[in-house]
Image (tube, helix red, strand yellow):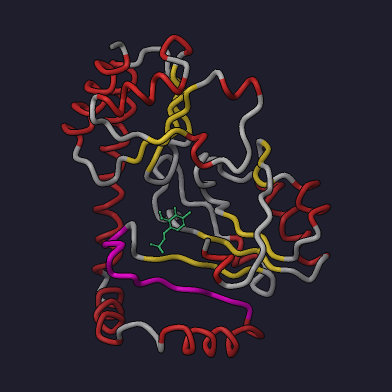
């Protein structure tokens, strides 16, 4: 909807195990691709080193641009954060990030690093869109950064989110035995694939709705219906960042009760 309102036609591209699938990208004829390489949204897949390099090769070959949405790049729990693509080729990558996951989404504060040759036009467009963000919020945030408070805040969030993720994985293990949980190395949500005995998905979702539990299946994010194999699995996108561990455990217990009718 955002792209359409800006007069841009968006083309949906499939993923493979390493990231956005290259052949469909090449043959699509597009010259700009929007990606979340550190932690694909919503699958949680981290792009392979090879695919990251291939993506940059593609951008250079079409004189195009990769929009790197690093929306949760700050939250990687099991190893050091993956470096941004932007640093590898600043002329072919535009990088975006925000404080939405680390302070509050309502602040609407973020950043955009674009190729130098784009700067003037981006600044101009921003001016005609909304005359800019509130100066006071930005000045306060700059102060917060300079004093090291933002680093401390990120570390605090890392700890809290890791505890919440662990609580969610443990609760799924206890209440939905046999589930597979993926996308857990980073970010603020996991994908839980439930054993087939909980299916079909439609009945499962109806039971959740009846019990007043709000859950979204991965299928709700797809541009095209899943193949026959995909239809049999229930894959849930479970965000955990805003819920304390005890409530996560309670929520998953409620889900399990509702699922078994
Ligand atoms: C893929 C993706 N990018 C970015 C964001 C954050 O958007 P913003 O920084 O505008 O709040 C989200 C929020 O959920 C998201 O899912």
Occupied quadrant, residue 249: top left
- In the image, is 10 to the left or to the right of 25? left
Foreground: 206 or 255?
206
The structure residue drawn at horizontal position 47% and vertical position 27%, both measured from the top left corner, is 235
- In the image, is 36 to the left or to the right of 205? right
- In the image, is 64 to the left or to the right of 176? right
Does residue 230 show up magenta in the picture? no
> What is the number of callouts on the image?
0
Image quarter where the C terminus lies is: top left
The structure residue drawn at horizontal position 60% and vertical position 67%, both measured from the top left corner, is 87
Ligand 1's quadrant is: bottom left
Foreground: 232 or 121?
232
Occupied quadrant, residue 177: top left
Whether residue 119 is situated above or below residue 28 in the rendered picture? below
Foreground: 77 or 54?
54
Occupied quadrant, residue 60: bottom right
Q: Position of residue 200 (x, y in %)?
A: 47, 16
Q: Position of residue 194 (x, y in %)?
A: 44, 19
Range of residues picked out in magenta: 102-115
Q: Position of residue 192 (x, y in %)?
A: 43, 27
The structure residue drawn at horizontal position 60% and vertical position 64%, both measured from the top left corner, is 67
The structure residue drawn at horizontal position 27% and vertical position 62%, both measured from the top left corner, is 104
Q: Position of residue 48 (x, y in %)?
A: 64, 44
- In the image, is 62 to the left or to the right of 163? right
Does residue 106 show up magenta in the picture? yes
Foreground: 32 or 230?
230
């Amino acid at each position: 909807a955002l792209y359409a309102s800006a007069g841009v036609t968006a083309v949906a591209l499939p993923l493979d195990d390493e990231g956005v699938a290259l052949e469909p990208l090449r043959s699509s004829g597009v010259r700009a691709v929007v990606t979340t390489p550190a932690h694909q949204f919503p699958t949680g897949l981290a792009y392979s080193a090879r695919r990251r390099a291939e993506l940059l090769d593609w951008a250079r070959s079409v004189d195009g641009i990769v929009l790197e949405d690093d929306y949760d790049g700050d939250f990687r729990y099991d190893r050091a954060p993956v470096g941004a693509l932007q640093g590898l080729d600043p002329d072919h990558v535009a990088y975006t990030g925000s404080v939405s996951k680390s302070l509050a989404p309502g602040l609407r504060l973020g950043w955009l690093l674009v190729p130098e040759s784009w700067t003037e036009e981006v600044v101009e467009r921003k001016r005609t869109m909304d005359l800019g963000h509130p100066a006071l919020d930005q000045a306060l945030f700059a102060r917060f950064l300079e004093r090291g408070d933002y680093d401390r805040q990120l570390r605090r969030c890392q700890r809290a989110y890791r505890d919440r993720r662990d609580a969610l994985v443990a609760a799924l293990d206890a209440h939905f035995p046999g589930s597979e949980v993926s996308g857990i190395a980073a970010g603020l949500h996991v994908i839980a694939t439930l054993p087939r005995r909980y299916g079909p998905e439609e009945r499962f979702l109806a039971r959740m709705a009846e019990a007043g539990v709000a859950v979204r299946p991965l299928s709700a994010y797809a541009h095209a219906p899943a193949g026959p194999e995909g239809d049999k699995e229930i894959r849930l996108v479970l965000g955990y960042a805003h819920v304390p561990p005890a409530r996560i455990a309670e929520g998953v217990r409620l889900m399990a009760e509702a699922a078994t009718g």
